[in-house]
C-alpha cells in the first residue's frame, strides 16, 4: 500500500498570526483537512508530522485515521529532519506539504503511476523570477540550481520545484542518514536528497504539475488567493449539480454546505455549514449552520445556527436563531430566537421574541394559524396556542389559549392644540 507523509511542522511566520498556518481556514475549513481528505482517497497509510502548536493541530485532526508524529525539531529541524520521525512502511513514499490545500487525489495518484527512484513535481512558470530552476533532460531531473547561482542559459529555464516528491523506500533509507545541516539555516533539507541522487545517477523523473493545484499558502495574500480558487471550485461543483446562481462571483458558499433538489441562490449571499433543500436564497442573505427546506429566504435575512425552516417565507431584515419554523410567514423586520412556530402562522413586522434575560435563554412556542400583529413583544418563556390573534403593539408575557385575542396597549391620551402651545404659533 502506498504511503503518504504530510509535513505540517512549520511555524508559518510569514502568516503573521498566532494561529498555526495549516489550520487557517479556506472556505471555512482548515487547510490541512483538505489535504488529509484528498490523501485518504488514495491510501489510508498516512502520516502527519507536526511540531509547532502540536497539541492544537493534533486535536483538530485526530478524527482522521492518520498516524501523528512530533518532529524532533531541536536535533533535526527542516523538511529532511521531519522525515526522520516517520517509519517507512511502503515501497513508495509520497511527501506532501501541509500548506497545499488545493491539491487533489487525482494529482496525487499521478506520482504513483511513474516508475522512478524519485518523482519530483515541477511547475512551468511564465515568470520564474525569484525561484530556483530545475534542469530537465528527456524528462529526467539533472540539477536544481538556485537563481543566484544560475548561469545565463539556466535562468531561461521555466521549470521550478513544486515541493512534492515521491521516493522509493530504499532511497530514503540510504540518503536520510546522510543529510547534513551544514547550511545557513542549520536545517536538514529534502532537496539535498535530490542532489545526492543525481550524483549517484538515480532515475529522477520530473512530473509537470499545474500551478493552481500545487499552490502553497505562505502568507495572508496566498490564503486569500487559495480561498478564491476553492470557492470557485465549490460553486462550479454545485452549478453542475443543478443549483441556480445569480452572479456567482459575489456568492460565498463554504466547504460544508450541501444542496439538495433544485435550489436558487442570489447575489451577495453567504451560506455556511448549512443544508439547503429545494429553496431560494434571495440577495444578501446570511445563513449559518441551518437547514432550509422548500422555503424562501431574504433578501437581506439572517439565519443563525441551530435553525430549521420548512415551507416558510422569511423576508428582509428578519433574523432567526435556534428556531424551528414550519409553514411560517415572517415578512420583515423581526427577530425570532429560541422558538418553535407552527404552520399557518404570520409574524408581523417588528415582532420580537424576548428570549434572554441577561443570564438564561428561554423558549417561545407558537401554534398553528396564529396572527401576530406588528411591533409585538413576546416575553419568553411563553406558549401561544393555535388560532390566536395578537393585536399590533402588544407586549405579551402570559400564555395565550386557543382561539383568543391578546391585546396589550397603554391608553391613548390626546391633548388638544398642544402643538401650537409647544411651538408658540398657529397655522
Image (spheres, grey):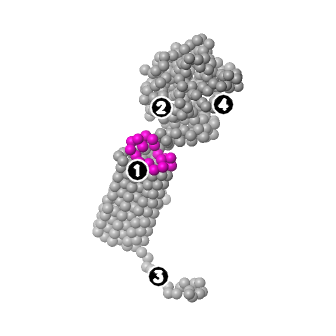
Kindly identify which residue carries mark 4.
129
Left or right, 49 with reference to 315? right
Mark nearer the N terminus (1 vs 2): 2
Disc 3/disc 2 C-alpha distance (Å): 72 Å
Q: CA distance from mark 2 to mark 4?
A: 27 Å
Q: Which mark is residue 104?
A: 2
Query: Is residue 308 visible in this depiction of the protein?
Result: no
The 10 Å Cα crowd at callout 4, few under 14, some 14 to 19, many 20 or more, is: few
Q: Magenta part of the protein: which range?
A: 235-253
Contact (Cβ within 8 Å) of mark 4 with mark 3: no
Of the pair 160 and 181, the residue shown nearer to us: 160
Q: How many marks?
A: 4
**Any magenta on residue 236?**
yes
Q: Residue at x 48, y 35 (%)?
A: 34
Q: Which residue is mark 1?
A: 264
The Cα atoms of the two marked residues, 4 and 3, are separated by: 80 Å
Q: Which label is found at residue 413? A: 3
Amino acid at each position: 500500500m502506498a504511503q503518504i507523509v504530510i509535513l505540517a511542522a512549520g511555524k508559518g511566520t510569514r502568516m503573521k498570526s498566532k494561529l498555526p498556518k495549516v489550520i487557517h481556514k479556506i472556505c471555512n475549513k482548515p487547510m490541512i483537512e483538505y489535504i488529509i481528505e484528498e490523501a485518504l482517497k488514495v491510501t489510508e497509510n498516512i502520516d502527519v508530522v507536526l511540531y509547532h502548536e502540536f497539541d492544537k493541530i493534533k486535536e483538530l485532526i485526530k478524527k482522521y485515521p492518520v498516524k501523528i508524529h512530533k518532529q524532533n525539531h531541536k536535533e533535526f529541524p527542516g523538511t529532511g529532519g521531519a522525515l526522520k520521525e516517520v517509519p517507512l512502511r511502503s515501497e513508495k513514499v509520497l511527501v506532501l506539504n501541509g500548506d497545499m490545500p488545493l491539491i487533489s487525489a487525482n494529482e496525487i495518484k499521478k506520482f504513483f503511476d511513474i516508475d522512478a527512484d524519485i518523482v519530483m513535481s515541477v511547475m512551468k512558470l511564465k515568470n520564474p523570477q525569484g525561484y530556483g530552476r530545475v534542469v530537465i533532460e528527456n524528462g529526467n531531473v539533472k540539477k536544481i540550481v538556485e537563481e543566484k547561482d544560475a548561469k545565463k542559459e539556466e535562468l531561461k529555464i521555466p521549470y521550478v520545484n513544486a515541493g512534492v516528491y515521491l521516493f522509493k523506500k530504499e532511497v530514503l533509507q540510504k540518503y536520510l542518514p546522510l543529510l547534513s545541516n551544514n547550511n545557513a539555516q542549520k536545517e536538514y533539507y529534502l532537496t539535498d536528497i535530490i542532489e545526492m541522487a543525481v550524483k549517484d545517477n538515480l532515475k529522477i523523473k520530473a512530473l509537470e504539475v499545474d500551478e493552481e493545484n500545487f499552490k502553497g499558502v505562505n502568507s495572508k495574500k496566498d490564503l486569500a488567493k487559495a480561498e478564491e480558487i476553492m470557492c470557485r471550485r465549490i460553486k462550479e461543483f454545485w452549478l453542475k449539480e443543478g443549483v441556480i446562481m445569480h452572479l456567482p462571483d459575489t456568492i460565498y458558499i463554504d466547504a460544508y454546505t450541501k444542496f439538495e433538489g433544485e435550489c436558487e441562490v442570489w447575489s451577495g449571499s453567504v451560506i455556511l455549514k448549512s443544508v439547503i433543500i429545494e429553496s431560494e436564497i434571495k440577495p444578501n442573505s446570511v445563513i449559518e449552520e441551518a437547514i432550509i427546506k422548500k422555503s424562501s429566504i431574504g433578501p437581506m435575512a439572517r439565519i443563525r445556527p441551530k435553525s430549521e425552516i420548512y415551507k416558510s417565507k422569511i423576508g428582509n431584515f428578519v433574523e432567526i436563531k435556534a428556531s424551528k419554523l414550519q409553514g411560517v410567514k415572517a415578512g420583515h423586520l423581526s427577530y425570532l430566537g429560541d422558538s418553535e412556530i407552527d404552520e399557518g402562522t404570520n409574524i408581523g413586522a417588528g415582532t420580537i421574541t424576548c428570549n434572554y434575560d441577561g443570564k438564561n435563554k428561554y423558549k417561545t412556542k407558537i401554534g398553528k394559524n396564529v396572527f401576530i400583529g406588528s411591533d409585538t413583544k413576546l416575553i419568553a418563556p411563553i406558549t401561544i396556542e393555535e388560532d390566536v390573534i395578537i393585536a399590533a403593539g402588544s407586549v405579551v408575557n402570559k400564555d395565550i389559549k386557543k382561539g383568543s385575542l391578546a391585546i396589550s396597549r397603554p391608553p391613548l391620551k390626546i391633548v388638544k392644540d398642544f402643538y401650537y402651545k409647544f411651538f408658540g404659533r398657529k397655522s
